Image (spheres, grey):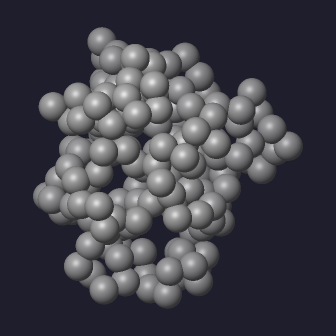
Amino acid sequence: MSVEKVREFLKEYNKDNDIMEHELSSATVELAAEAVGVIPARIAKTLSFKNKEGDNAILIVTAGDAKIDNKKFKSEFGHKAKMLTPEEVLEYIGHGIGGVCPFAIKNDQVKVYLDLSMKRFDTIFPAAGSSNSSIELTCDELERFSHSEKWIDVCKGYEEMEEVK
C-alpha cells in the first residue's frame, strides 16, 4: 500500500504517526476538505505533468482552489502543460490518482515544485499516498519533506488574500 510507503518515508521526520486515514474517500479536493474539516483551499493537491523531454514527470503541489495557468507554466518550464495518464502516474510516481503526494516517490528523478498559492495558510493538507489519507503540514515542512526544487508561481483562480486560517 502506498500509504505505508509514505508512513515509512515520513519516519525520518518523526511525522509517520501524523498521517490521518479517513473512513471516507479524500480523493478530490472537496472530499478531502470534508474529511479533514477545512475549506477546500487548504487541501494541497499534487498535480502530475510530463517533463519537457516527455520521458519523466514533474509534480506541482498547489492550493486546493488554484488552477494551473498555462501561460505561467510554459514560462516556468519551457513547454506546454501535459498531465500524466493514470498509468503514467503509477509508473513514475507510484501513488494512484487521488492519493498522489510529493512523498515516497517511486522515481527519484521526478522533480517536485511548490506553488505560492499555498503560502496563504499556516498549515495545509496534502494526501499521504492513498485516496483516503492526508497529513497536516506547515509550508516549511512540506518544502523540507518533499525535497522540492523551489517555490513557483504557475497558478491562477485562487483567492489572493493576506492569509486565510
In the displayed structure, does residue 87 sit left or right of residue 132? left
Residue drawn at x 57%, y 79% is: 76
Position above or below: 64 against 18: below
Residue at (24% x, 35% y) in the render: 5
Residue 165 in view here: yes
Seen from this angle, which residue lies furthest front?
A: 12
Give the position of the N terminus as an image quadrant. top left
> Residue 60: percent from the left, percent from the top?
47, 59
Residue 75: image location, x then y, percent: 59, 83
Q: Which quarter of the image is occupied by the C terminus? A: top right
Decide if residue 90 is on the left or right side of residue 139.
Answer: left
Mark yes or no: residue 86 visible. Answer: no
Residue 45 picture location, percent across and down: 46, 45
Q: Is residue 39 left or right of residue 33?
A: right
Which one is in front, 143 or 75?
143
Is residue 25 positioned above or below 143 on the image? above
Q: Is residue 140 above or below residue 66?
A: above
In-front residue for pair 12/55:
12
